[in-house]
């Protein structure tokens, strides 16, 4: 995955869901708790940091919150 693309999408949406090849469940990234570097992403959690490679991200999508987000 491209770090610049992920950063742009995160900035535009405020939060982003990502699928990471080493985790079974998708992760939710927010502008306030995520740092996307050129090679690594750091996610600040309540009990520590989760760090994974940008290249391990295999998909992303906007996290939906409203009917209009779903086109309804």
Image (cartoon, rainbow, N blue to C red):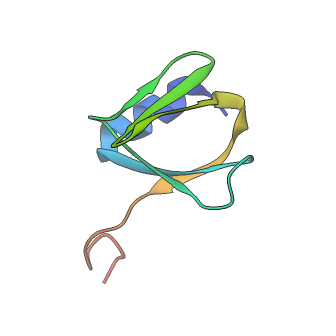
Most extreme residue toward the bottom is: 72
Q: Is residue 10 above or below residue 28?
A: above
**Residue projecting furthest to the top:** 38
40, 8: nearer the viewer: 40
Asked if 17 appears above or below 68 in the picture, the reply is above
Tag count: 0
Please provide percent x and percent y for residue 64.
35, 67
Q: Which residue is pictured at 67% across the width and 34% down the height?
A: 1
x, y percent for residue 6:
51, 34
Task: Name the residue: 36% across, 76% down.
Answer: 70
| Residue at 32% across, 35% down | 33
The image shows residue 4 at horizontal and vertical percentages of: 52, 24
Q: Who's the residue at 50% across and 55% down the image? A: 61
User: In this picture, is 5 found above or below 22?
Assistant: above
In terms of depth relative to the viewer, which is nearer, 50 or 57?
50
3 with respect to 56 (left or right):
left
As drawn, is 29 to the left or to the right of 22?
Answer: left
Which residue lies most toward the front here? 47
Looking at the picture, does residue 54 appear above or below residue 17?
above
**Of 58 and 32, which appears nearest the observer?**
32
Q: Residue 26: horizontal and vertical position, in percent? A: 57, 58
Q: Considering the image in quadrants, where does the C terminus appear? A: bottom left
Q: Nearer the viewer, residue 55 or 33?
A: 33
């Amino acid at each position: 995955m491209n770090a610049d693309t992920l950063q742009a999408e995160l900035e535009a949406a405020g939060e982003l869901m990502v699928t990471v090849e080493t985790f079974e469940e998708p992760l939710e990234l927010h502008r306030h708790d995520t740092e996307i570097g050129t090679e690594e992403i750091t996610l600040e959690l309540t009990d520590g940091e989760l760090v994974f490679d940008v290249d391990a991200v295999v998909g992303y999508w906007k996290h939906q919150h409203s009917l209009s987000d779903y086109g309804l």
